[in-house]
Image (tube, helix red, strand yellow):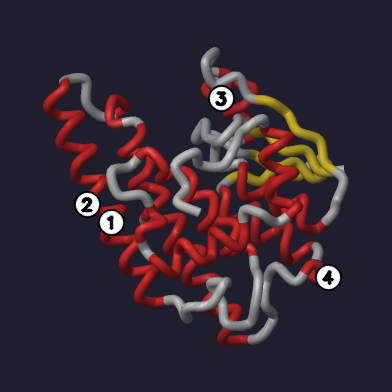
Amino acid sequence: MYRLYFAPGSAAMAPQAVLEEIGAPYELLTVDVAGRQHHGEAYRRLNPNGRIPVLLDGDFALFETAAICQYLAERHPEAGLMPSDGRQRALCLQWLTFMTNTPQVAFIDWFHPDWKFSDAAGQAALKAAADAELQRAFQVLEEGLPGGDTMLAGGFSLLDIYLTMLMRWSRFMTRPMWHWPKLKRIAGATYPRPAFQRMMQRQGIAWADNWPG
């Protein structure tokens, strides 16, 4: 059985939704963020960066959200969450890497500018810079995607789960991610899926109250 360290609404959303899609049994292990459990010695033995999530597969520990999603998708090819076709697979890896390295990183600065700056002016400047980078990243996605209900022309994949997680994170922004029509269409098709709904229910979180429908 897989075991997933998570905190509600964190980057563990995507791996848990992948687990729900593939139908594999798993156990959720709550990380006490308020108590800084993720910075404790025991957790840092699993993830030296002190970030959430971590996946345990027996005695194998894996961190980094994108790596966990890819690992699970490739371990369960019957779920069809990772394309095997050369170019579609390459595009899947391209967008997975982009979402991890660009908008996901910018979201950290947007949500937690206090991690880098203690003064109000520094925090405001960092948050503004992160907002601008997020808007740019959303535009890159919008212009690069084919325009259907999924990020890949070949159909539903782990990318759609990942993008929908980021969509939820954007709900407090002045210009949330759903202002981009292609991105809104993808998330609008993904978050109602039973697997994504089960993930949110088990995490005790809801979708975006201000979602335009």
Q: Label 1's element?
A: helix
Which of disc 2 and disc 4 is earlier in sequence? 4
Q: Residue at x 65, y 68 (%)?
A: 157
Q: Label 3's element?
A: helix
Of badges 2 and 3, the one in the foreground is 2
Which amino acid is tagged 2? Ala
Of badges 4 and 1, the one in the foreground is 1
Q: Which residue is mark 4?
A: 78
Answer above or below: position of 38 versus 160: above
Which of disc 3 and disc 2 is earlier in sequence? 3
Rendered image quadrant of residue 125 = top left
**Marks 4 and 2, how far apart at CA:** 39 Å
**Marks 3 and 4, how far apart at CA:** 33 Å
Q: What numbered label is drawn on residue 135? A: 1
Q: Residue at x 38, y 47 (%)?
A: 105
Q: Which residue is mark 2?
A: 132
Which amino acid is tagged 1? Gln
**Marks 3 and 1, how far apart at CA:** 30 Å
